[in-house]
Image (spheres, rainbow, N blue to C red):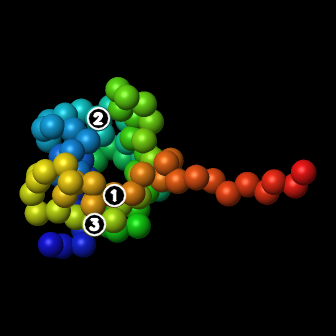
Amino acid sequence: MSLNQRLDKWLVYARFVKHRSDADALIEGGHVRLNRQRVSKTGHALKPGDVLTLTLYSGVRVIKILGAAPRRGPASEAQLLYEDVAENPTTQNQDA
């Protein structure tokens, strides 16, 4: 699999949306940011290490791209394509 993949296809393969038309609407509606920059082109190339910010019905998701996929597979495969950055615990100084 190529290291680069179209944003709309990746959103489908990673199971954030069900259809490419849904991905297109999400991107064109301004609900997707790539490395803090708003993305307007559905064919924008993603690469491992990129950070996506998605505004979905369930809320805002911040994810790090780990890889590309050749197809839309089961959820267990899709979860290997990204890391949820917002779920990582933050380290804070606890000077008491």
Nearer mark to the viewer, of 1 and 2: 1
Residue 67's mark?
A: 3
Residue 82's mark?
A: 1
**Secondary structure of the residue carrying numbered label 1:** strand
Residue 56 vs residue 16: left or right?
Answer: right
**Secondary structure of the residue carrying numbered label 3:** loop
Residue 45 is at least partly visible in this image: no
Front residue of 11/25: it is: 11
Q: Quadrant of residue 79?
A: bottom left
Residue, x 28% and y 66% (percent of image)?
67
In the displayed orientation, state which residue is furthest to the bottom: 2
Nearer mark to the viewer, of 2 and 3: 3
Please tell me whether residue 85 is drawn above or below residue 57 in the rendered image.
below
Front residue of 81/20: it is: 81
Q: What is the spatial separation of the Cα atoms under label 1 and label 2, in whole angstroms?
A: 18 Å
Residue, x 90% and y 51% (percent of image)?
96
Residue at mark 2: 26
